[in-house]
Amino acid sequence: LGCAAALVLFFALNTQPAPRTNRPAPDLLALLPGTAAGWQVKTSDLYEFRGTLQTEHLAQRHYIRADAGGSEPLEILIYVAYWPAGQAAVSLVAAHTPDACWPGSGWVNVPVTQPRVTLEAAGHPLPLTEHRVFSGGDVKQHVWFWHLYDGRPIALQDPRSPIALLELALRYGFRRAGDQVFVRVSSNRPWADIRGEPVLDEFFTHMKSLGL
């Protein structure tokens, strides 16, 4: 009975609604540049993913620019998702990283020498960044992403490991007071080729308000 009571208390404390529920959600599309000189900009409709991700706050824009050298166009894709405080468990958000979702869509994870890198954008260093490379046929995508909880980055856990996700749940609770943000930038070029692009600098300048 004592163990059962302790278990009930544990889940009660970790699933209670967050007290900070009056914080307005950010306008995600306003964070992503709507126009960029020399770029074609496409805004994605992510409605179908709202149920799976348990949030309606999703935004993605695709930036395409012709390469002066005549090779394939330069592409940058920026995606942002937001969960108000108490809306979703940290472990749920962590379970939808590119490591978990991209292979399920047919992409192959290409090993990289540095899965965590330090990048700079808009004149300031960014929090430690998860870096991946995926290939799909003749297409290769470089991917960089961050998971923020209450304005601070969370170290990535293996999304395919139940133990790792349970550790996240135990550390942050199943529903707690911190809002969450997931940010992903991907491109068909490495960071060295896109670093300093105004579209990225503008985006990361806007993201300072959310902790990135």
Image (spheres, grey):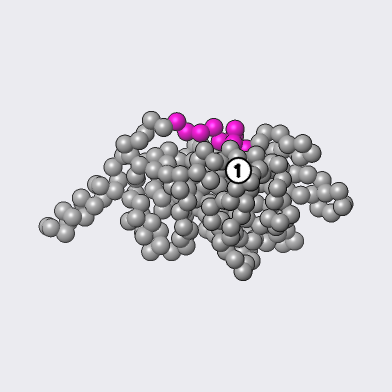
Residue nearest the observer in this picture, 149 or 1: 149
Which residues, given as a range, are shown in magenta?
A: 24-32
Residue nearest the observer in this picture, 9 or 176: 176
Tally the marks.
1
User: Does 131 sit above or below residue 177?
Assistant: below
Q: Residue at x 36, y 59 (%)?
A: 166
Tell whether 19 sits left or right of 186: left
Q: Secondary structure at mark 1?
A: helix
The residue at which mark 1 appears reads as 204
Tell whether 67 sits left or right of 5: right
Residue 1 image position (x, y, % from top left): 12, 57
Confirm whether residue 98 shows in the render: no
Q: Residue at x 58, y 51 (%)?
A: 125
Residue 68 image position (x, y, % from top left): 86, 48
Residue 188 image position (x, y, % from top left): 72, 54
Confirm whether residue 190 shows in the render: yes
Rendered image quadrant of residue 80: top right
Residue furthest left as drawn: 1
User: Does 184 sit above or below residue 164?
Assistant: above
Rendered image quadrant of residue 102: bottom right
Residue 200 image position (x, y, % from top left): 66, 44
Q: Residues within 10 Å of mark 1 (few under 14, many from 20)?
A: many
Q: Label 1 sits on what residue type? A: Phe
Rendered image quadrant of residue 63: top right
Residue nearest the observer in this picture, 139 or 67: 67
Q: Residue at x 68, y 55 (%)?
A: 191
